[in-house]
Amino acid sequence: MSWETVRLEIDDDVATLSIDRPDAMNALNVETLEGMTDALAEAAEEDARALVLTGSGDDAFIAGADIAHMQDLPTEEAREWVDLGHEVADALESFPAPTIAAINGYAFGGGCEMALACDLRIAAESAVIGNTEIDLGIIPGWGATQRLPRIVGDETARRMIFLGERLDAESAAEAGLVGEVVPDEELEAVTTELAERLAAKPAVAIRAAKESINQGYEGSQTSGLDYEKRAFTGLFGTHDQQEGVAAFLEDREPAFE
């Protein structure tokens, strides 16, 4: 299979899934999300024993969702949009082998959420991470309201989501959002070395360990994610959502109600 905005490479049991829209800072649009879904399925079918998610270019891991696409979404289409993002994040979370987010630049909004859905996260020193949806008049819609507090704790998660706070790589490490910070030029090598170590572990045991860890969250997270979907969808068409997106696209400060 081939995709315009996604690249999948498999080398010695390690799959690398790269978002390839560097001119758009790897922002996620429908085509890219659908490509990610297909690529993850293909990597699973090829029995990849570890998977790395990263972004093309030097500036961004995934700068977020495609905001222009969201500008005038009616509620019904907003639900389809949020479902598609959840499908990808859930596929990362349930991928049958360990997943690593190699955060090589900006990881905002939906980009942060895709990193949260991975098992492990490594950040380049230049990385900046945040859930910035509040400044668009919406909330995170692809899992951050549920996954972020479990990773960084309630207080930090609320500050990041309520205020749209952005963390540099070192601050993200201190918060427990990433497990390791490395110089930019070493990110690929360090990530590859970790992926190879994971791929060398017993695959069945690793899969059982991952499923067991995930099962510990399943009871409350499912209902929480369903609520998040409804809350996210309901914000489309409000004044603040339309104003937040318009202000972003017009490069001005938003005037929220």
Image: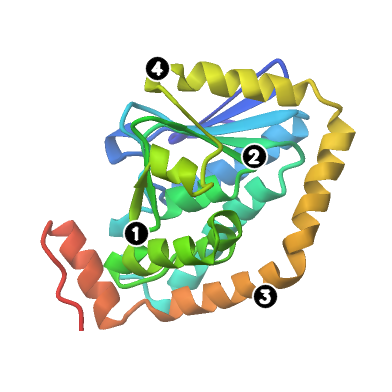
Q: CA distance from mark 3 to mark 2?
A: 25 Å
Label 4, on which residue? 185
Q: Residue at x 38, y 30 (%)?
A: 125
Name the kind of residue labelled 2 in the image.
Leu
Name the element at disc 1: loop
Which numbered disc flags the more N-terminal residue, 1 or 4? 1
Q: CA distance from mark 4 to mark 2?
A: 26 Å
Name the element at disc 4: helix
Q: Is residue 81 visible?
A: no
Quarter of the N terminus within the rendering: top right
Q: Position of residue 44 (x, y in %)?
A: 73, 36
Q: Are marks 4 and 2 in contact (CB under 8 Å)?
A: no
Q: Position of residue 250 (x, y in %)?
A: 12, 59
Label 2, on which residue? 40
Label 1 crowd (10 A; few <14 / some 14-19 / many >=20): many
Q: CA distance from mark 1 to mark 3?
A: 23 Å
- Mark in the foreground, 4 or 3: 4
Tell whether 19 sits left or right of 117.
Answer: left
Q: Residue at x 55, y 61 (%)?
A: 153
Which numbered disc flags the more N-terminal residue, 1 or 3? 1
Label 2 crowd (10 A; few <14 / some 14-19 / many >=20): many
Label 3, on which residue? 223
Q: Residue at x 44, y 45 (%)?
A: 172
Name the element at disc 3: helix
Name the kind of residue labelled 4 in the image.
Glu
